[in-house]
Image (spheres, grey):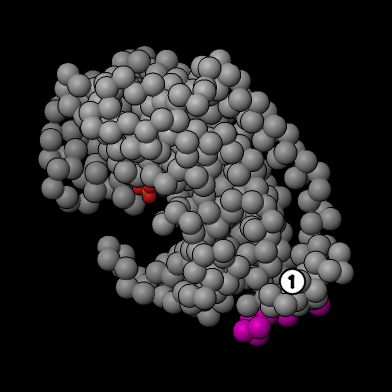
Amino acid sequence: MEELLELYNTMGISPAVYHYGEQALERLKERFQRIDMIAEHNQAKVIAAMQKNRVSAACFAATTGYGYDDVGRDNLEKVYADVFHTEAALVRPQITCGTHALTVALSANLLPGDELLSPVGLPYDTLQEVIGIRQSPCSLKEYGVSYRQVDLLPDGSFDYENIRKAINQKTKLITIQRSKGYATRPSFSVKQIGELIAFVKAVKPDVICMVDNCYGEFVETIEPSDVGADMVVGSLIKNPGGGLAPIGGYICGTAECVERCAYRLSAPGLGQEVGANLGLMPALYQGFFLAPTVVAGAEKGAIFAANLYEPLGFKCVPNATESRHDIIQAVELGSEEGMIAFCKGIQAAAPVDSFATPLPWDMPGYKDKVIMAAGAFVQGSSIELSADGPVRPPYAVYFQGGLTWCHAKLGILMSLQKMVDAGLVTLA
Ligand SMILES: *Cc1c(COP(=O)(O)O)cnc(C)c1O
């Protein structure tokens, strides 16, 4: 213990900050145990799926060109389908990011004249252009797909009455975002999502229910596809890539929906048959294998952050004690200086680019300045320890990831240290 303290000290963490962290950890033992149990469950689920599908060295071979008969790629999709308990899956490096995966899922399953409904309020920023809520060439709106939205009630619950009213003859697909993203609403549990899907299907049985599963994978022992979702969609540089996937996205769901997605992604008639794996199979398999424990570490980091900052008077969403349905932690730091200090700490604790200093900048597409801290092996990966936020009241930093719990802990301690160094926090 003394040696660790000394080592941390050489890295810039004072004994006061370290001990404050240890006190918080004392209170979290039971909670961390429950997270480990979820990780154990999900780890077994992934291993069982890999065993059932006889994963072997042959699956790791690189293919190029068209990628016909790509055993590794086809088998990985079976593994994903088994873990998510779906009929089919599309898991591809050719899906460039989460937004792309969602775009494929939506545009493959919505035709001109159809209507898309979001019963959970405004979707994630990047989807607003995809849908056409904000004008963009090639939006769904341009292709004649209309959009309707029902906001959440003030307490964050579903507005069932208005959802019922919003569902009409044209309603073809509903999109449910599991994680809050950059909004202030709570994230939904899988159980809540299941209740919403059951309600929607009772009103209109043939409506397709899609869940934006970004940041939610492996946080619980069940996924939205276990409670009626026809498609679950996400990014491989978030949870399911386990930090090793350098690119990619997935869509798991019914055979019919996924087949359409494959036709949309490649071309009608070609579908899942093409798409070389370019040598990425080892990373995609091993990343998926590691994902349950990586997600557990990230979730512990989020809880640790809330338990460090909330007692110091900073509002945390979720708060220090409530249950979690994704790996995102928002901390309201109350000032620009606070955001800068916090992000400096996260950056200083990174294995990559630790020498860089994050500063607020005018990022294209954003109204306010944005600050970001990330020292990641995979650029932009947010399963790796990262923090960002728009510089405006309440000066909230959105913090997520950490490939290991130990790194997440170091990053959060360092963030607090920078707050102390800047005179923004005094520890008793
Ligand atoms: C990250 C995210 C997306 C988009 O993913 P990108 O990989 O950044 O394109 C969509 N929805 C939610 C809820 C997200 O968190």
Above or below, 275 against 16 in this view is: above
Q: Mark 1 Cα within 10 Å, few/some/many (few <14, many 20+)? A: some
Residue under the image location 54 percent in, 71 percent down: 354
In the rendered image, residue 306 lying in the magenta stretch gets the answer no
Q: Nearer the viewer, residue 334 or 153?
A: 334
User: At x 53% / y 28%, what residue is drawn?
Assistant: 223
**Is 242 left, or right, of 135 in this rendering?**
right
The one of 232 and 352 positioned closer to us in this rendering: 352
Which residue range is magenta in the image? 419-428
Circle 1 — which element?
Answer: helix
Q: Quadrant of the N terminus?
A: bottom right
> Is 364 positioned to the left or the right of 386 in the image?
left
Image coordinates of residue 281 in percent, x first then y, are 43, 34
Q: Is residue 416 depicted above or below 402 in this figure? A: below
The residue depicted at 35 percent of the width and 44 percent of the height is: 97
- Quadrant for residue 203, please give it: top left
Q: Main secondary structure of the magenta part?
A: loop
**Amino acid under label 1?**
Tyr
Q: Can you identify the residue that label 1 sits on?
A: 8
Question: Is residue 164 visible to the viewer in this orientation of the structure?
Answer: no
Q: Position of residue 141 (x, y in %)?
A: 16, 39
Quadrant location of residue 20? bottom right
Across and down, in percent, residue 313 comes to 68, 69
Give the left or right position of residue 246, taking residue 187 as reference: left
Residue 380 visible in the picture: yes
Residue found at the very far right of the displayed protein: 2
